[in-house]
Amino acid sequence: MLLMVLAVVTFLVIVMRVVVLRGIAFGNPVWYFSLINWLMVAGSVSLLEIGRKQDVRHAWVLVVATTVYSLSATVTLRFDGKVEARTRQFWSQRRETLGHRTLSRLSVLIAVSGAISMLYFYLVGYNLFLIGVSDALSGSRSDFATLRLQSYAGDRYFAPGYANQFKNAVFPLSVALLLTERWRHGKALGWRLVLPVAAIVFLVGAGQRGAFVLSILTLLLFLQMSSGRRGVTRSGVLGIGLAFSIFSLLSFLQGRFSDGSGILESAFGSAWDRAFRSNQGASVAGFRIVSDLPIVNGREWVDAALGLLPGRRGSDLSSVVYAELFGGTRGTAPVSVWGSFWHNGGWLGIVVGALVLGWVHATVYRRLISGSRHPVRLMVFSATVILLSTWVAGSFTYILNNGLLGLFLMVWFLKQRNAQATPQDEPQLVVAA
């Protein structure tokens, strides 16, 4: 049965890529999510035990959810038969440029979000990235795992979710927009070269490997969308190399390297574990837990949403799964997105959730190709596509905590100010046509 599950999901992914997404896969969250979901399914199937009733149910959930998602996305993308023509028209457009007004507003966003990020780390009392660099230079070793936990789940509350909107989204994306625009026009970067360094310090200062990877993926997709080049580029290779290096450093500081293994072997092992084993193990363990619990009819999602408010802890489901896996409370291990749908709605939650997810992903792509190639619009859509595509674990708050609210802030601020510009001074910013 388990091989059948993997075969069915693999078949669906191949059909989606070769038939449904032919010519429209680039920049499409339907394709990216289908691929990442396949990785989750492949890793999870290898851990399922056919003798457990929870695992049998989990296997059927994977098949049903992927099938419904694929059908929903296919119908939404192809219902009018115009998506391919609109895609060709979109990529044939001239890439617009940023005018002086938008560049000035970006500078304001950078200054404000940078100040908020520095204030956050000042209140926390430390920056884990700088501590790691200091330890590497001095030969000492700090308790990185405890410091990381205390920064977002300690006795004192520092509003990490709100800070994430600025240090993980607004600041790095605004910096990327400003620098790429200056570079594109051959202008000297000068002192502005310190900004990407600050972005890295902010991104990984709380020990969040995932936030840094999301930002790198967003930047790479933005650069490809801006240039229209869909293959491997030099900037892409450099970006992946930088991301892997910093990801490896954070893994080492968190004690995730294996004893007795070489640095490169441990680095690749940590990346492999993150991509193919970590979330999949939590997915299987989490579904075994929630499968034996009553369906909560959305209450867990309500708790998760309330956890976004200052001083509220929110849902503890990921902590329960972590305790089941590792026997402690020093981390979190979220259930898969399908496990979350099951826990909150049972089979109805699986079907409705997969339908809505497929519709949302396909609609985002249709909105993308229905507008201009304005740099701000491309950056916002790049970030949105990456956030939606990588939501394969946890509740919907994953998207909010990783910067969606920050994206809304960027769009609102730049559109408000942009409305005062004349057509000659500034191209119109239309984020969603």
Image: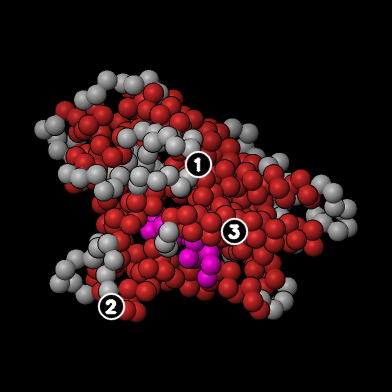
Q: Position of residue 159 (x, y in %)?
A: 47, 45
Residue at 24 percent across and 44 percent down: it is: 329
Nearer to us in this view, 156 or 131: 156
Sequence order check, earlier mark of 3 and 2: 3
Q: Which residue is mark 1?
A: 400
Q: Secondary structure at mark 1?
A: helix
Position of 155 relative to 378 (above/below): above
Q: Which residue is mark 3?
A: 115
Position of 128 relative to 37 (above/below): below
Q: Position of residue 71 (x, y in %)?
A: 46, 32
Sequence order check, earlier mark of 2 and 1: 2
Label 1 packing within 10 angstroms: few (<14), some (14-19), many (20+): some
Residue at 44 percent across and 37 percent down: it is: 311
Residue 130 placement: quadrant:
bottom left
Task: Give the amino acid at mark 3.
Answer: Ala
Nearer to us in this view, 62 or 157: 157
For the stretch drawn in magenta, the main secondary structure is helix
Q: Secondary structure at mark 2?
A: loop
Q: Quadrant of the N terminus?
A: top left
Look at the image and give the residue range highlighted in magenta: 197-208
The residue sitting at the left extreme is: 51
Q: Is residue 181 visible?
A: yes
Residue 267 placement: quadrant:
bottom left
Q: Secondary structure at mark 3?
A: helix
Q: Which residue is mark 2?
A: 139
Q: Position of residue 429 (x, y in %)?
A: 75, 49
